[in-house]
Image (cartoon, coloured by chain):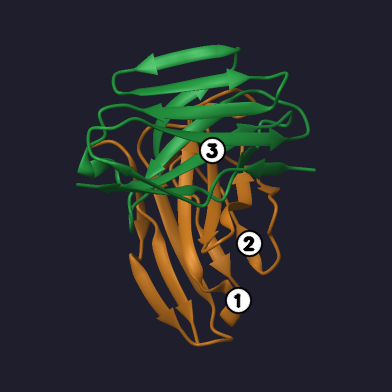
Amino acid sequence: IAGITQAPTSQILAAGRRMTLRCTQDMRHNAMYWYRQDLGLGLRLIHYSNTAGTTGKGEVPDGYSVSRANTDDFPLTLASAVPSQTSVYFCASSDRAGAAETQYFGPGTRLLVL
Amino acid sequence: GQNIDQPTEMTATEGAIVQINCTYQTSGFNGLFWYQQHAGEAPTFLSYNVLDGLEEKGRFSSFLSRSKGYSYLLLKELQMKDSASYLCAVLNSGYALNFGKGTSLLVTP
């Protein structure tokens, strides 16, 4: 079934550790996004990529980095996790950037930083 | 700046009609999306409006007034499975999607 997969489903992480959240889509979408969702704050954009080889910063990029080596994969890395990064992380993709395209979301990764 | 407001919670009865409002002030406008999100799951696309008026899709309809910075999602013939959060999101001038905090809808028997 076509769509977006994320791994891991959930993770408990010690503060200070490095962690990479994985995201893969098989829809050949050009644009990909990472959001975090926190109670009372809604979905906030962390980083995005309009096409393979390019990335950009969203609303809350500090403490996170991304790469887009190919069309399908868009990993999100926490270099040194802090408790405030405890959240649910959603990856999304859309067919084109810079257009009114629907974004499709992966199932999410639930991260707890202790 | 971006400001998207929607009620935090609503309750409605099975079989009834409910209207979830969303008001927005954003830097530019390229359309408004509604997403549904069940607890513990990913948001899923419901509707998109870019022109003023009503878009109907089965039991769900979405309305937009660009001059008023206002939209609503109308759910008819409510079912228990409609209990979920409903997210209003505006596509700004840079084609970034800005989300409201969501409205948690509880459908009761």
> Can you identify the residue that label 1 sits on?
A84
What residue sits 73% from the left and 18% below the top? Answer: B67
Give SS at disc 2: strand
Percent x, y of residue B60: 35, 25
Front of the two marks 3 and 1: 3
Tell me if mark 2 has few (under 14), some (14-19) or many (20+) residues whose alpha carbon lies within 10 angstroms of its own.
Answer: some
> Can you identify the residue that label 3 sits on?
B88
- The alpha-carbon separation of the residues under discs 3 and 1 comes to 25 Å
| Residue in front for this viewpoint, B65 or B89 | B65
Q: Say what amino acid the circle numbered 2 marks.
A: Ser
Q: Colour of chain A?
A: orange
Chain drawn green in the picture: B
Disc 3 to disc 1: CB gap under 8 Å: no
Front of the two marks 1 and 2: 1
Q: Say what amino acid the circle numbered 1 marks.
A: Ser
Looking at the image, residue B46 lies above or below residue A53? above
> Can you identify the residue that label 2 sits on?
A65
| Residue in front for this viewpoint, B42 or A82 | B42
Which chain's residue wears label 3?
B
Percent x, y of residue A97: 60, 29
